[in-house]
Image (spheres, rainbow, N blue to C red):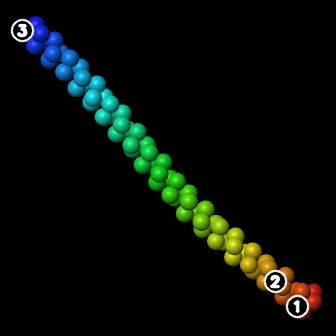
Amino acid sequence: MSDILNKLENLERNIELLNKKVDSINLENDLLKDQQSKLVSDKSELLKKNEEAKSELRALIDRIDHIKANGKE
């Protein structure tokens, strides 16, 4: 009988440890999802800024080419 009780106690401890591990993994998963969401948002913002910078650079190059072609205004 004592052997069965020991096994049950061990099983109970293992279940508690597993529950704690599951909670820990769920928390880590939530944190990683939040981090991924922020990284996706940051990437989108950086891509937008990159396109804006390219557009400004193209406009500047066009102005320089226009000045070269037509002389100083």
First in residue order: circle 2 vs circle 1: 2
Q: CA distance from mark 3 to mark 2?
A: 92 Å
Residue 41 at x, y = what percent? 52, 58
Where the N terminus falls, by quadrant?
top left
- The answer to whether residue 73 is visible is no
Q: What whole-number distance in Å separates the C-alpha atoms at marks 2 and 1?
A: 10 Å
- The structure residue drawn at horizontal position 54% and vertical position 63%, both measured from the top left corner, is 44
Which quarter of the picture shows residue 21?
Answer: top left
> Which residue matches tag 1?
69
**Camera-nearest residue between 72 and 2:** 2
Q: Earlier in the sequence, mark 3 or mark 1?
A: 3
Residue 73, by quadrant, is bottom right
Give residue 20's position: percent from left, percent from top.
Answer: 31, 28
Of tags 3 and 1, which is closer to the observer?
Answer: 3
Q: Is residue 65 left or right of residue 58?
A: right
Which residue is at the far top? 2
Q: Which residue is mark 3?
A: 1
Give SS at disc 2: helix
Residue type, numbered disc 1:
Ala
Neighbour tally class for label 3: few under 14, some 14-19, many 20 plus, Cα within 10 Å: few
Residue nearest the observer in this picture, 73 or 65 = 65
Q: Is residue 21 above or below residue 43?
A: above
Element type at mark 3: loop
**Where does label 2 land, which residue?**
63
- Mark 3 or mark 2: name the one nearer the start of the chain: 3
For badge 3, the amino acid type reads: Met
Q: Would residue 15 be visible to someone looking at this image? A: yes
Q: Residue at x 27, y 29 (%)?
A: 18
Characterize the local packing of mark 1: few (<14), some (14-19) or many (20 or more) Cα atoms within 10 angstroms: few
Query: Does residue 32 appear to the left or right of 17 in the view shown?
Result: right
Residue ID at (39%, 44%): 30
